[in-house]
Image (cartoon, rainbow, N blue to C red):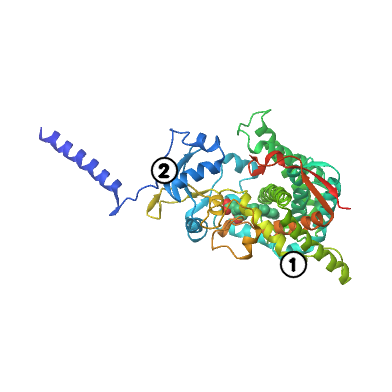
Amino acid sequence: MEFISLCFLIFSSFFLLNYLLKFFSFGQVKLPLPPGTMGWPYIGETFQLYSQNPNTFFASKVKKYGSVFKTHILGCRCVMISSPEAAKLVLVSKAHLFKPTFPASKERMLGKQAIFFHQGDYHTKLRKLVLRAFLPNSIRNIVPDIESIAIKSLQSWEGNLITTFQEMKTVCCSNSYAFNVALLSILGKDEVLYREDLKRCYYNLEKGYNSMPINLPGTLFHKAMKARKELANILAKILSLRRELKQNHTDLLGSFMGDSEGLTDEQIADNIIGVIFAARDTTASILTWILKYLAENPSVLQSVTEEQEAIMKLKENSGDDKVLNLTDTKRMPITTRVIQETLRVASILSFTFREAVEDVEFNGYLIPKGWKVLPLFRNIHHSPDNFPEPEKFDPSRFEVAPKPNTFMPFGNGIHSCPGNELAKMEILVLLHHLTTKYRWSLMAPQNGIQYGPFPLPQNGLPIKITLKR
Ligand code: HEM
């Protein structure tokens, strides 16, 4: 009997100790989780998020629970944050505690060794190489080539009814502006030889990007994985040709190849494929929104056109080379504000994903290790505290710099967009020629938004472009 009492005592002490340890972690009272609901087992609140405009979901949660709340999406427990200070903490000041995270299928498709998926030394090394290729001084030399791509694209659209987004990005359009500029900046002029093959592979890759990750013959995912392999083979050919010719290149591939510590061919391929992806859809999407907002705001379009005509005249009168250069693109403040305002209103990257690498204390709450953390860029850009009348398209608001950490279209911190200067420059170059030589009209009233995956005007914005007389 005494033995049984002793066993009982030992067991109850063990459970009590275990409970106390769970309740107080090393003497500290365990913090509560952020407010919010987790929805149904496993599916969580995925249906609520995807059955409506995601922004309605975020806005209603923020209204109910404040700027930090928990939820459960696509099988992941998440904390969503929508205050500028909290976003800064996750992306900048405590970035080491929050690693980037993507579904495994996306990593396989783009390549596991691509910059987006990494943290630490490997990421720092890649980032240095990527920035080297996209800093203003590096992209200076390709402005004239980008200009000729812009001129050719516009000429091919003239007189036609076009779907703006498709023409800006798509592989099936021979003059797809954002795709051709991305290839030029990443692979230089070598890409011309392989352009059609690269486009075909990208076409298949992107069709599988948002498909179910089932790798069986006939599925979109399987086709995408095949296209991924083919892309790697094309890049291997370009690499070996460059090694044979031993020329120096200032594009992204040149930067990767010139690294003294050496990247493997696989690492180079994963990063080239990934960066083309990052460069093309984003820029094409922003250009589409800009054309929509300019068409809907004639007085803004008028100011942009006048600014661009003044630059054109200045170049004609100065007797200089008429080709645009990087300095010209820095003399376009009105057009630049239109780009900024479009980036804010459209907020094409509505949020990003991170994962807590350890338990993190956050504004008095606990974010447990392994939980996803989503800074909600769109909510920050659309908060009246940061931007009065946030739904109004008003580029003049950028005459005054926004409050710190309230404007993050290119992200913030160590993973912020290294291609932002290139993106702004290529948009300015296209707008220069578009507004000085062409008019365009929207083919239908454009209030709807589609997601694919970035928010886009309905049907990719069908427009008609004509030459000005
Ligand atoms: C308007 C166009 C663009 C927008 C709005 C945009 C936006 C962004 C954002 C928000 C991030 C950060 C994501 C995060 O923190 O998780 C990012 C990262 C990145 N972007 Fe862009 N981007 C654009 C164009 C480009 C271009 C043209 C390139 C390359 C030529 C590029 C290459 C990259 C790369 C490589 C990263 C990952 C950086 C890292 O992880 O260190 N982007 N972009």
Depicted 189 relative to depicted 104: above or below: below
Q: Secondary structure at mark 2?
A: loop
- Camera-side residue of 69 and 271: 69
- Camera-side residue of 218 and 418: 418
Dividing the image into 4 quarters, which one contains the N terminus?
A: top left
Give the mark nearest the N terminus, 2 or 1.
2
The residue type indicated by label 1 comes to: Arg
Label 2 vs label 1: CA separation? 47 Å
* Residue at figure coordinates x 69%, y 57% from the top left: 338
Q: Secondary structure at mark 1?
A: loop
Depicted 413 relative to depicted 453: above or below: below
* Residue at figure coordinates x 65%, y 34% from the top left: 221
From the viewer's perspective, tell me whether residue 163 is left or right of residue 416.
right
* Residue at figure coordinates x 49%, y 61% from the top left: 93
Residue with the mark numbered 2: 36
Residue 253 visible to the viewer: no
The residue type indicated by label 2 comes to: Gly
Residue with the mark numbered 1: 331
Q: Position of residue 25 (x, y in %)?
A: 31, 51
- Mark 2 neighbour class, 10 Å CA radius: few under 14, some 14 to 19, many 20 or more: some
